[in-house]
Image: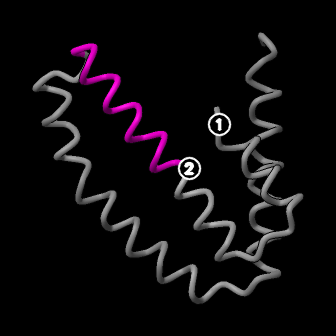
Amino acid sequence: MAGPPLIIYFQFLNMNKTEFRNSLLSIFLVMSIMRVTIYSWESLITFNTFIWMLYILPFSITGLIIGNKLHKKIEEDLFKKLVTALLLILSISLIVKSYPF
């Protein structure tokens, strides 16, 4: 659950949307490389897992393209409001899930 704390920290640094995105994606890239390396070292990535990764790859590339286009179109103020709203929704969701109903 590294995402939300990093996002909150970056919001407090008052980064613009490009700095925010670049910083977050750089950290996630490094974390992903470390995970794949460790998982491979521990033989946790099986052939079946690799096939699933190949299935997901086109969706990841599509998301990357759509994200790049949206990043250019969304204004700074709207971006910050969306990030805040998503953090609020995530927080409420986590609180609700933590209570056994």
- In the foreground, 56 or 96: 56
- The amino acid beneath tag 1 is Ala
In the picture of the structure, the residue carrying the numbered disc 2 is 27
Disc 1, SS = loop
Q: Nearer the observer, disc 2 or disc 1?
A: 2
At 41% across and 34% down in the image, what residue appears? 34
At 26% across and 19% down in the image, what residue appears? 41
In the picture of the structure, the residue carrying the numbered disc 1 is 2
Q: Quadrant of the C terminus?
A: top right
Q: Is residue 70 above or below residue 97?
A: below
Q: How many residues crowd mark 2 within 10 Å: few (<14), some (14–19), many (20+)?
A: few
Contact (Cβ within 8 Å) of mark 2 with mark 1: yes
Apparent side of residue 34 relative to residue 75 in the rendered image (left or right): left
Identify the magenta region.
28-43
- In the foreground, 75 or 42: 42
- The amino acid beneath tag 2 is Ile
At 75% across and 35% down in the image, what residue appears? 93
Residue 5 occupies quadrant: top right
- Rendered location of residue 49, percent (x, y): 20, 28
- Rendered location of residue 35, percent (x, y): 40, 31
Apparent side of residue 89 relative to residue 46 in the rendered image (left or right): right
Q: Distance between the Cα atoms at labels 2 and 1? A: 10 Å
Q: Is residue 46 above or below residue 10?
A: above
Type of secondary structure dominating the magenta stretch: helix
Which label is found at residue 22? none
Disc 2, SS = helix
